[in-house]
Image: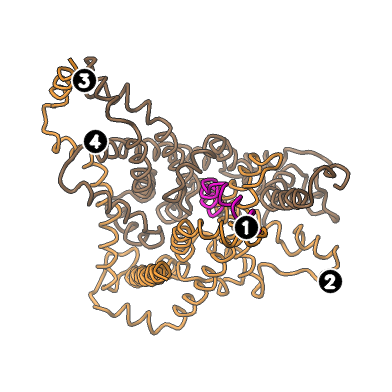
Amino acid sequence: MSQAFRFLSVPGQAVIICALALLVFSAFPFAWMASTAFKPSHEIFATPPTLWPTTFTLENIERLFAETKFLTYFRNSVTVSLSAVGLTLIFSVPAAYSLTRFRFPGREQIAAVVLFTYMFAPVMIIVPFYILIRFLGLTNTHLGLVLAYTAFCLPFNLWLLRTFFQSIPIDIEQAALVDGANRFQAIIFVVLPLALPGVVATGIFTFILAWNDYIFARVLLSRDELKTLPVGIADLYNASVVDWGMIMAAGLLVLAPVLAVFVFIQKSLVAGWGAGGVKG
Amino acid sequence: MAEDVALRSKALWRFRLPEPVLGLLLVLPAVSLLVALTMYPVLYGVWISLFNKHSFFPEQTFIGLGNYVAILGDAEFWASVQRGAIYAVSTIVLQIVLGVAVAVLLDQRFPGRNILRAIVIFPYIVPTVVAVILWKWLLNSQFGLVNYLIESAGLSNQPISWMGRDWIMTSLILVSVWQFFPFVVIGVLARLQTIPGELYEAATVDGASAVQRFTNVTLPQLKSILFVIVLLRSIWMFTKFDTPWLMIQGGGAETYIRTLPVYTYQRTFAYYEAGLGSAMAVLMFLMLAVGAAIYFRLWRREEEL
């Protein structure tokens, strides 16, 4: 430490030390999870614990694929999350465009109500929501779950997309119309490309919320082959004596898509923070 | 010529449908969905809170405010409110303190800063189930790394039972703070970057120490963003269900972290009392509304001073 950082002032060294402590606090749990996932079981319970697997093994992942329905859960999660992204965008893009480009009675009230519904936490609406979904005959379907995520993400997505549409000058659209485009073409070829970062950001927020959700999936689904990852993993954990190597391998695989979208999201997470980014 | 263009564009703007109608048509699907799947369930929840209603069978009898009377006389309800308040307040305080400190740190210049910013945010977007299971492994009383480190450091000669009755609330708070403090970091860091450097230079010229610069320059600038952060985090921590619920699984210490959302869930889906569960959700909402009103008032008084 002292040799390498001698050129730094005392406060500079303090910053580096704090930064390293922070790095350990935030990242080490994940490193430990990865390390456990690739250790054979005798090494997982060894004292003293090894930081890095001395024998690197894929047997935990193999066992996860062979003995559990992990791949089914994974496929369910992908289907449900992507459908929720698609459906939310279909509902929110036209609405957000309308709220910024058209004048009609009640426009401000709609925007206010949208912001208000954002305050509801899942646990506060889950009981009547469950009864409603059961009334519609949609329990134990992925459609019910997709509807839940769409409704739940819609307020934030509308709010975020609205700020993006507001930032696009109306003159650009008018110029396209002058050049002979009709309104629909102007939206598809001029406005949407400019609003693309906002559309991508809202899509990613929805994806993460749907991918991570536990409570809606827990309540709306009971059939094992329909479960999404969070519920599937929680049940795996509760089922019997905990197989730590396998559970850590499962956790690692669940994080892979999150990590992939995270590379995109970091900047927009900061930019779109205002209303809470991902709710949680 | 210019006027010509303006006129032409105006003509082109005219669509076959009148503008307000088209606008409403575009907004209608989203609004209907919100009304059907959010507003309606909320109002329906208030309605069924007046019934003795089973969660699965269609039978229901109107009992007026009976559910509310039953809840207010239920000692476990008040205990869960108390546990929820302890959980919410302690996690919020720790998140704010840690979040502001980390944001100030990440605002300094040092090598690897951008990567560290990304790493710090990451726990926030991880599924709660992964965060909880990960920490249960780290805190495992027999094989957990945390106990190993504590024992090798000689801080304790017997393993600490992190999921046992004495420690489970502490463990829950630790996991929650770890998972949610990045939200504070994101908000505060965004605001810190907009504080003009001249303010700090002027304060330094006036002889202010680093601590004085923080309390006299940084904190006042952060006030408005902290107002929003505290509000949102309070709502979310007070209604947080999945973290405490998943912490409870597989352990015997469940009653020690049974917060109000967990208790509401149990009454509805373990005891099948949908009417009672709805009444508890309504009470939760009322408590939040009262809390928010007090918070706004306190804030306004602060502004006037």
* Residue type marked 3: Asn
- Say which chain tag 4 marks: A
In x, y percent, where is residue B282? 33, 69
Label 1 in the same subunit as label 3: no
Up the image or down, B167 lies above or below A35; here it is: below
Q: Determine contact: label 3, label 4, CB under 8 Å.
A: no
Q: Quadrant of residue A240?
A: bottom right
Residue at label 1? Answer: B206
Q: Which residues are magenta?
A: B183-207
**Subunit under mark 2:** B
Specify the colour of chain B. orange
The disc, 2 or 1, on the residue closer to the chain's N-terminal end is: 2
Q: Is residue B277 visible?
A: no
Q: Residues within 10 Å of mark 4 (few under 14, many from 20)?
A: some
Considering only vertical position in the picture, is A254 above or below B40?
Answer: above
Report x, y in % for residue B200.
60, 52
Where residue B153 sits: x, y (%)? 85, 64
The residue to which callout 2 is attached is B157
Mark 1 touches mark 3? (CB < 8 Å): no
Secondary structure mostly taken by the magenta-highlighted segment of the chain = helix
* Residue type beneath disc 1: Asp
Of discs 2 and 4, which sits in the foreground? 4
